Amino acid sequence: MKIFSGIQPTGDKHLGNYIGGFRQYAATQELGEAFFCIVDLHSITVEYDPRDLHDRTLDLFAMLIATGLDPDRSTVFAQSHVTAHAEASWLLSAVTSFGQLGRMTQFKDKAEKREFVSAGLFTYPVLMAGDILLYRTDRVPIGDDQRQHLELARDVAERFNARFGETFVVPEGIYPEVGARIMDLQEPTRKMSTTGGTEQGTVKLLEEPDVIRKKFRSAVTDSGREIRRGDDKPGVSNLVDILAVATQRTPGEIEVAYDGAGYGDLKRDVGEAVVELLAPVRQRYLELRADEPELLRLLSVGAEKARAASAPTLEAMYDRMGFVRLG
Ligand code: AMP
Ligand code: TRP
């Protein structure tokens, strides 16, 4: 079984990324041959500072290892180190529907918010399809917000296979059962995000324990007093989900355990559980990040492995599409 996922080196990573992303990656690497890609090429599709891109790529690489990816077992690498990704993206643009790209809600949301909308922001899902398809991926662990992009990747694979012959595996998503959408603690009807959320409602992975405790203490709850999940209780539902993930219980078990307790108890306990969950991650991250030569060495190892794994697929694409190859 082949597993592939990608994550952008943008924004400070937060608890939503941990629960919907990092945690899943570490768990899914056990399922088979896994590839985890820092998608630096994707992050140039919106306004960015080149100096930030450099540092954030190394930050994210350290974070992926700190959250449990094992670079000996899995292939952890940067997208720009493997030129096959940019090439595959161009080839696949021939079998991607312009209309379908225009229906991507992430594109519409992001385009609406800015004056300059790059062509790359529009074609972003084609690059993502290439990332996945190059490794003949079976499963893609992602958050809920990436469902539509994965659907497009599946359509692209099917269209290519139908037109040029069976080349790609049609991948399936793996979505977290609990925590696919962690919400902002202050505005629990929108997802936690360092770009679209509130500062007080977003828990960053490297924040000091006391800051994290405070953010949970001031989390917005709902009317009523019962600790249960429900559409009418977005704030409490979110806290229950977070506590469930942080203490490895089900949300149902949390509801039973907190029957009769107050919102104050819940908020205190979630804060404490998250501090405990993140403390070792932070510690490992700081150690790894301090050793840049070692990070670069591990990145080269990842790039080598990813090049070897993707080259045959890219070659098959060129060949089936009719390009002259020089042997
Ligand atoms: P990004 O940082 O946007 O590249 O996202 C990295 C991963 O984290 C993706 O798999 C997202 O689906 C996931 N993710 C981002 N925000 C959240 C959230 N609020 N709740 C759950 N998962 C999230
Ligand atoms: N678009 C994804 C996000 O914003 C990142 C990504 C790029 C990705 N390529 C991928 C995720 C391939 C999974 C597989 O989160």
Image: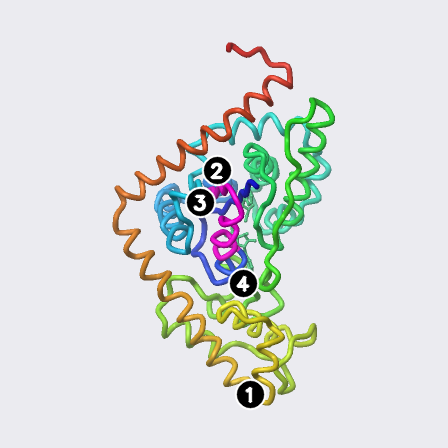
Q: Which residue is mark 1?
A: 262
Crowd class of label 2 (few under 14; some 14 to 19; many from 20; radius 10 Å): many
Q: In 3D space, how far apart are the residues under numbered discs 4 and 1 (Cα atoms)?
A: 24 Å
Q: Which numbered disc, 4 or 1, marks the residue closer to the eye?
A: 1
Q: Is mark 4 within 8 Å of ligand 1?
A: yes
- Disc with the residue nearer the chain's start (4 vs 1): 4
Q: Which residue is mark 2?
A: 41
Q: Are marks 3 and 1 in contact (CB under 8 Å)?
A: no
Looking at the rendered structure, the kind of residue marked 4 is Met
Q: Give the position of the N terminus as an image quadrant.
A: top right
- Disc with the residue nearer the chain's start (4 vs 3): 3
Indicate the quadrant of ligand 2 in the picture.
top right
Q: Which residues are magenta?
A: 21-38
Q: Is mark 2 within 8 Å of ligand 2?
A: no
Q: Which residue is mark 4?
A: 192
Q: Where residue 75 sits in the image (x, y, percent)?
A: 44, 40
Looking at the rendered structure, the kind of residue marked 2 is Leu
- Is residue 190 or residue 137 the one in the foreground? 137
Q: Which numbered disc, 2 or 3, marks the residue closer to the eye?
A: 2
